[in-house]
Amino acid sequence: MSNLSVFKNRWLAFLMLLPTLVVLGVFLYYPALETFRLSLYRANFVFQTETFVGLAQFQRLLGDPAYYQSLLQTLIFCVLVVSLGLATGLGLALLTNQPIRGSAVYRALLLYPYALSPAIAGTLWLFMFNPEVGLVNNLLRTLFGIAPRWLDNPILAFVLVVFAAVWKNIGYNLAFYTAALQNLPRELLEAAAIDGATPWQRFRYVTLPLLSPITFFLIFVNLTYAIFDTFSLVDILTAGGPTLGKTGITTFLIYRIYQDGFQNFQTGFAAAQAILMLVIVGALTLLQFRTGRRINYGA
């Protein structure tokens, strides 16, 4: 017998779905349609006029070398944030999962960065890496006699934003990996130990495969975080710069939309970028659904 409830009155089902449909329509579908409409127009903020240009904004975008540089930078940034974030989160979860005194305190301290807003986290890193009065440069000046200008050098600025993004999200990865480790079947680990497996072999062939469902989930959550939720960090730390090649080294796709839409007032051009970004994210979502079917969640 099916466990699904069946409404005898179809209008009652529609009425119960109405609040959700209204929210989706107002906050999701209407903005998406309006963004697509804007991408077909060139707006003039001085005269408050719009001129229909068809797909010209998309043609301009696809012929812009700076856009491809932003796309490549975003890709590298996402790969680094996801890989470093998961590796660090798993490593810390393994350490804090050991039966040592005060492990709960360590976990609470490591969760702290995730509780901060991105704006506050960015401000903290901005002060820590200030070339004149920052804590990091004071230590480097005392120990090695050097004081790098972190936010003026393109490579250092990119690395700094990557590490700030990883640090900000480390508590999230740690929480999920810790919960997963505490729910692993102990009998499998004990059987592997009895069979003579070393700690590394137990981790490689028992623990890591059992963590694959949560790792799969965290990969896409961290990917979404790297694409969308690092805007504030970039804005406070580097404002998209410093310039390297055709654009700023930390001008990622989401920040480029902001620059073109709210600083350069090219609304149609920014809307075209948002549409292309929507296509990219849609492709990633489709990939998640297709590959997610192969993951065994142990249900």
Image: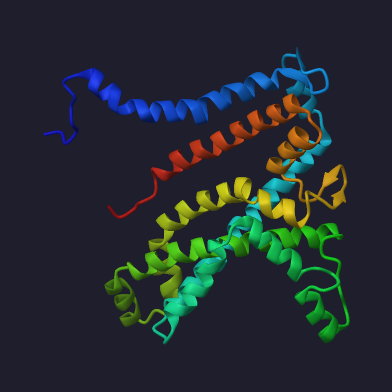
Residue lying furthest front in this view?
A: 47
In which image quadrant can residue 7 be found? top left
Q: Quadrant for residue 252, please give it.
A: top right
Residue drawn 77% across and 28% down? 61
Residue 182 in the image: above or below residue 294? below
Q: Is residue 23 left or right of residue 225?
A: left
- Please tell me which residue is depicted at 55% across the width and 35% down the height of the picture: 283
Image coords of residue 152 (percent x, y):
86, 60
Can you see residue 151?
yes
Q: Position of residue 159 (x, y in %)?
A: 74, 61
Left or right: 266 with respect to 100? right
Residue 31 image position (x, y, % from top left): 57, 27
- In the rendered view, tell whether residue 71 sits above or below residue 22: below
Q: Residue 64 or 267: which is nearer the viewer?
A: 267
Q: At 52% across and 65% down in the image, what residue appears?
A: 171
Residue 142 image point, x, y percent: 83, 85
In the image, is 180 to the left or to the right of 6?
Answer: right
Visible residue check, residue 199: no
Observer-nearest of 176 and 261: 261
Query: Please, which residue is most extreme toward the left here?
Result: 1
**Count of residue discs:** 0
Relative to the observer, which residue lies in front, 98 or 51? 51
Coloring applied to the structure = rainbow
Q: Which of the image's four quarters has the N terminus?
A: top left
Q: Residue at x 44, y 84 (%)?
A: 102
Residue 91 shown left or right of residue 97 in the figure = right
